[in-house]
């Protein structure tokens, strides 16, 4: 296959257009930072390019991209660069405390393990079993993390209503 064969690049380009938003959102939920999410997005699709010819179905592509995103963000979060830097305070202001945006900001304040399961379950619609497979954890661990995340969110959101 030569570099001038346009068909060889059409499939990854279409996949990028379909899934870039999904990958970026998951990366953002895990890192809480836009520039880190941009870096992870690029890395995910670079890694995907190495395996794109082996994909069997649309679900296989999506699952592969989500798995690569989780792995890349895990690598980023455990890197010495990340551990030795301090995040900038982006001062996100919310005018109406009852908006869905406020709930999203509260989700972003949760620990990474809780943000990930909340995002995969509520924003992407995955079941507990599917999340366990994606994150390579036990289904009971996923259930526990969902329960604890819901509890933390409930406390915060109820306190804001007072």
Image: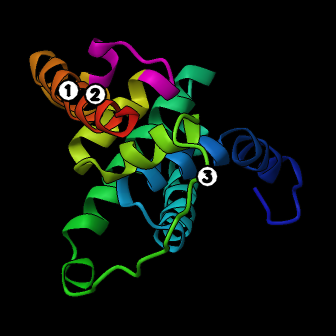
Label 3: element kind = loop
**Hey, which quadrant is residue 5 in on the image?**
bottom right
Q: Compared to 59, does 34 lie above or below? A: below
Q: Position of residue 20 (x, y in %)?
A: 65, 48
Indicate which label's residue lies in the foreground, 3 or 2.
3
Q: Compared to 147, does 68 lie above or below? A: below
Report the front residue among 56 and 134. Answer: 134
Label 1: element kind = helix
Contact check, label 1 and label 3, Cβ < 8 Å = no
Q: Position of residue 100 (x, y in %)?
A: 56, 34
Alpha carbon of mark 1 to alpha carbon of mark 3: how far?
24 Å
Indicate which label's residue lies in the foreground, 1 or 3.
3
Give the numbered dot on residue 95.
3
Q: Residue at x 56, y 67 (%)?
A: 38
Q: Which residues, given as a range, are shown in magenta?
A: 122-131
Q: Residue at x 83, y 47 (%)?
A: 10
What count of labels does the image hold? 3
Q: Quadrant of the N terminus?
A: bottom right
Determine which residue is flagged by label 2.
Answer: 154
Alpha carbon of mark 1 to alpha carbon of mark 2: how far?
5 Å
Is residue 57 something one can see in this rendering? no
Q: Position of residue 8 (x, y in %)?
A: 78, 50
Q: Main secondary structure of the magenta part?
A: helix
Q: Residues within 10 Å of mark 1 (few under 14, many from 20)?
A: few
Q: Upstream in the sequence, badge 3 or badge 2?
A: 3
Contact check, label 1 and label 2, Cβ < 8 Å = yes
């Amino acid at each position: 296959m030569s570099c001038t064969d346009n068909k060889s690049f059409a499939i990854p380009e279409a996949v990028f257009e379909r899934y870039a938003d999904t990958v970026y959102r998951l990366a953002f939920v895990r890192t809480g930072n836009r520039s880190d999410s941009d870096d992870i997005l690029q890395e995910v699709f670079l890694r995907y390019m190495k395996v794109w010819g082996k994909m069997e179905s649309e679900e296989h592509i999506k699952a592969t991209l989500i798995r690569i995103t989780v792995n890349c963000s895990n690598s980023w979060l455990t890197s010495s660069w990340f551990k030795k830097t301090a995040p900038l305070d982006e001062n996100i202001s919310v005018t109406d405390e009852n908006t869905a945006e406020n709930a999203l900001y509260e989700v972003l304040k949760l620990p990474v393990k809780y943000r990930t399961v909340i995002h995969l379950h509520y924003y992407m619609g995955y079941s507990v079993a599917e999340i366990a497979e994606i994150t390579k954890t036990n289904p009971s661990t996923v259930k526990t993390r969902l329960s604890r995340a819901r509890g933390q969110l409930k406390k915060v959101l109820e306190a804001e209503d007072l």
